Image (cartoon, helix red, strand yellow):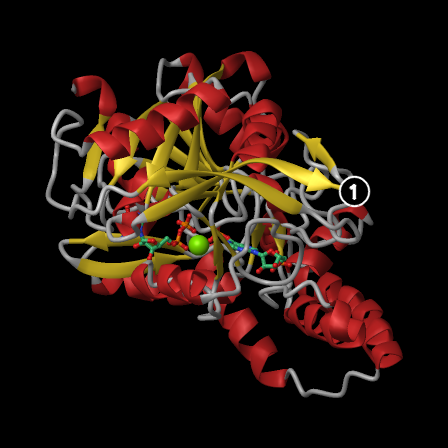
Amino acid sequence: MIDVLLGLQWGDEGKGKIVDFFAPDYDIIARFQGGPNAGHTLYVDGQKVVLHQIPSGIFHPHTDNLIGSGVVLDPVTLLREFQKVEAMGVDPRKNLCISERTHLILPTHRALDKASELSKGEEKIGSTLKGIGPAYMDKTGRNGLRVGDILDRNFTTQYIRLRLKHQKILDSFGFREDITDWEEEFFEAIELLRQLRIVNGEYHINEQLRNGKKVLAEGAQGSMLDVDFGTFPFVTSSNTISAGVCSGLGVAPQKIREVIGVTKAYCTRVGSGPFPTELHDDTGELLRKTGNEFGATTGRPRRCGWIDLVALDFACMINGVTQIVMTKSDVLDAFPVLNVCEAYMIDGREVNRVPYQMQKTEIDPLYTPFEGWMTDITRINTYEALPERMKTYIAHINARLGVPVRYISNGPGRTQIIDVQKG
Ligand code: GDP
Ligand code: IMO
Ligand code: MG
């Protein structure tokens, strides 16, 4: 069976840490969508590591890791990440495999991403510029190159053909940067890729499932960045929700058991786009400082605000979330008042739904204030021992979402997590 772990907000919910925590209970950790736009932070023996392409189970030698067909893969990022992981004493050749259907991110995809964002000016998406949009466009446009193609003798010819197509578009954007260095790195990285375990991802995972193995699908980005259901057009280019697991790994929906949704105890967003509960004041600044809210991929400051139960309720609905992991709860330790967004006021009316068009809609969040717990919770390891005011905050979230908060993460460290059911 497959369990799914994914973000319920706009990304960076702490998925990497939680996958690393759960990994020993699974045989395979599989990424099913997204690419190097993801930045998943783990602490291994106290050392911080950020993973972009490699699944977050890599530091567990008995857990296999799959980069699935729905992912877009930049070989250059993979090579750099390989070196980083190797330097930490782990050989990813042993417990990493890659689906042959995974689409490749070419240097020109990165250039196209940059050119496209520049052309949008004020209306830019705030893309990570990793080439995600252009690579997925080549997939749906049926032009892209896939990992399996690198084993073909004609790979370079195929590459040149696609590169020429891209060049025409880059010329129309007036993009003049020299990307020769990027191409050199790319072909070096292709050499590494050729030495790795390239598998038929669909047969691989289904065989494992038939043999009773347990799979954890690791989401990237968050539900509100989903290309279909997020705050379009300020979204990423893949299905980040649970449905993406079936199309991204080639598994049937009946195989999915738990859908574990990860949310921060507050909310952040990096890049442009609507964010109803965003705080532009000192409280927002304090959240950013206390939570160290700077992007793991781009280093950009993250926008910060209160938890949004309208958006979370929507995310729980479209994903079929069965349990919630609440992360970064310790960041709220010293806030005397915590606001929880219950509904949106739009045109003088109270609305409980995420509107179709958030960008052009004036949204005023309706808040219920809660008393903060004003206690350091970072060393607490049982639910019982948590402050009563925090339990009230969590009980309110449970009741509104109709889904239980099952785990509470109270620090970035590997062991800073509380299982609510253990009491
Ligand atoms: P991901 O993309 O969802 O994996 O999340 P990121 O790694 O981009 O961002 C989450 C950040 O929060 C990282 O710096 C983590 O080390 C950190 N983090 C995760 N869980 C907690 C937590 O419970 N408390 C605190 N203070 N930090 C956390
Ligand atoms: P993880 O997996 C937060 C955001 C970008 C931008 C938009 C589109 O670490 O949670 P893209 O590069 O996909 O074209 O960017 O999506 N974005 C993320 N924000 N966490 C991520 O991943 C993100 N991946 C993309 O900032 O607004
Ligand atoms: Mg991240």
Q: Quadrant of the C terminus?
A: top left
x 58%, y 78%: residue: 182
Task: Identify which residue, 107 or 263, lies in the foreground.
Answer: 263
Q: Residue furthest front?
A: 348
Residue 379 falls in image quadrant: top left
Q: Is residue 352 left or right of residue 411?
A: right
Task: Identify which residue, 146 or 129, lies in the foreground.
Answer: 129
Q: Quadrant of the N terminus?
A: top left
Residue topped by disc 1 = 347
Give how far across and how far down residue 187 sits, in percent. 55, 70
Which amino acid lies under the numbered mark 1 shown in the image of this protein? Asp
Q: Is residue 93 left or right of residue 45?
A: right
Give how far across and how far down residue 102 sits, in percent. 59, 45
Give how far across and how far down residue 309 sits, in percent. 52, 34
x 64%, y 53%: residue: 152
x 47%, y 47%: residue: 306
**Dot 1 lies on which element?**
loop
Residue 120 falls in image quadrant: bottom right
One can see residue 245 in this view: no
x 59%, y 33%: residue: 310
Residue 229 falls in image quadrant: top right
Q: Is residue 5 left or right of residue 320?
A: left
Give how far across and how far down residue 108 sits, in percent. 69, 71
